[in-house]
Amino acid sequence: MRWGIEQRLEFIEFRLFWEGSINRANITEFFGVSVPQASKDLTLYQERAPGNMEYDTRAKRYVAAERFVLRFLEPDPYIYLSQLRSVAEGAAPASDSWIAALPSADVALTPRRDIDIEVLRKILDASRDCASVDIFYQSMNRARPDPIWRRITPHAFGYDGFRWHTRAYCHIEHRFKDFLLPRILDVGSKGEPGESGDQDWLWNNYFDVIIGPHPALTEGQQKVVIKDYGLDRGNGALSVRYAMLFYVLKRLGLLGDAAKQSAYTQHIVTVNRKEAEAALEKAGLRL
């Protein structure tokens, strides 16, 4: 089956599953296909997923049957909510979403970091070519209060929930570091690479952060935290790159002893906190 047809069948099933109905106009408007093609898509869906939808003559729409069985999609609430979030954040227009009736939604916004598009293109280019590149970088290091030109060999990108950075070998300090994209003020010429990403031990190796409900919560509250975080038998392991460990712990409120914080604002703790401290030290950081 051709990819375009398969995508439209998934679209039909998405609308039926999440919104309960679909018509030909939904398909023609979203994909720009003809009305006859939309009719063929609906007929094909009925052939491939018999009994999943019925035609409502009053509404002039196909509606999900009572015994609806998913054939083309694996239901995932995060796929739906990620689309809702993208629209709510303004990252994507509503017309790009498969959701027809967008519910009212908002997100806890953070200031949008200013990333120069040419900077990103050139860093991506150097990363693809396994080359080094000169960057004019403003660090927050006391020893370097002003921006300087420095050479890096980028090999990956990381997102801490607020900011994007490139993971790169620093030719000044002769080690792998994170360079925030908004702090790269300019990009110069490419050159011979330094160490490759295969040699970045902190990026290529993982540490399991074991989390569990805060011990000060009641039994019922701990059970709902276990459900909320999808924990297995009260504890759950998050496999985290050493290079991303600080960011993950910070975002989850697990820097420091979370058990000493209020259980009503900090619902989870690090079960293997001593090991996490040692892992952070290995990554060159301390709690």
Image (cartoon, rainbow, N blue to C red):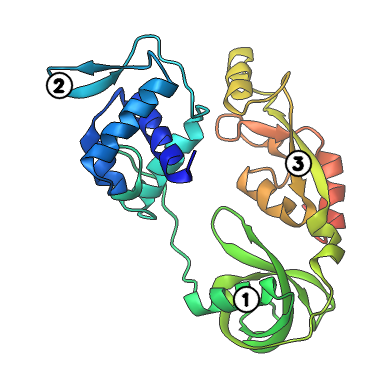
Dots 3 and 1: beta carbons under 8 Å?
Answer: no
Please give left or right for residue 6 compared with residue 26 in the image: right
x then y, percent, for residue 4: 42, 45
SS assignment at label 3 = strand
139, 259: nearer the viewer: 139
x then y, percent, for residue 261: 65, 37
As measured in the structure, the alpha-carbon distance from the residue carrying label 2 to the one carrying label 1 is: 52 Å
241, 220: nearer the viewer: 241
SS assignment at label 1 = helix
SS assignment at label 2 = loop
Q: Residues within 10 Å of mark 1 (few under 14, many from 20)?
A: some
Residue 172 sits in quarter: bottom right
Dots 2 and 1: beta carbons under 8 Å?
Answer: no
Q: Is residue 94 visible?
A: no
Residue position for label 1? 125
As measured in the structure, the alpha-carbon distance from the residue carrying label 2 to the one carrying label 3 is: 49 Å
2 vs 3, front mark: 2
Q: Residues within 10 Å of mark 3 (few under 14, many from 20)?
A: few
Residue position for label 2? 59
Q: Amino acid at mark 3?
A: Ser
Residue position for label 3? 239
Q: Amino acid at mark 2?
A: Ala
Please give left or right for residue 122 compared with residue 11 in the image: right
3 vs 1, front mark: 1
Dots 2 and 3: beta carbons under 8 Å?
Answer: no
> Residue drawn at (25%, 43%), measured in percent from left and top?
28
75, 264: nearer the viewer: 75
2 vs 1, front mark: 2
245, 13: nearer the viewer: 13
Q: Earlier in the sequence, mark 3 or mark 1?
A: 1
x then y, percent, for residue 238: 73, 38
* Label annotation for residue 112: none
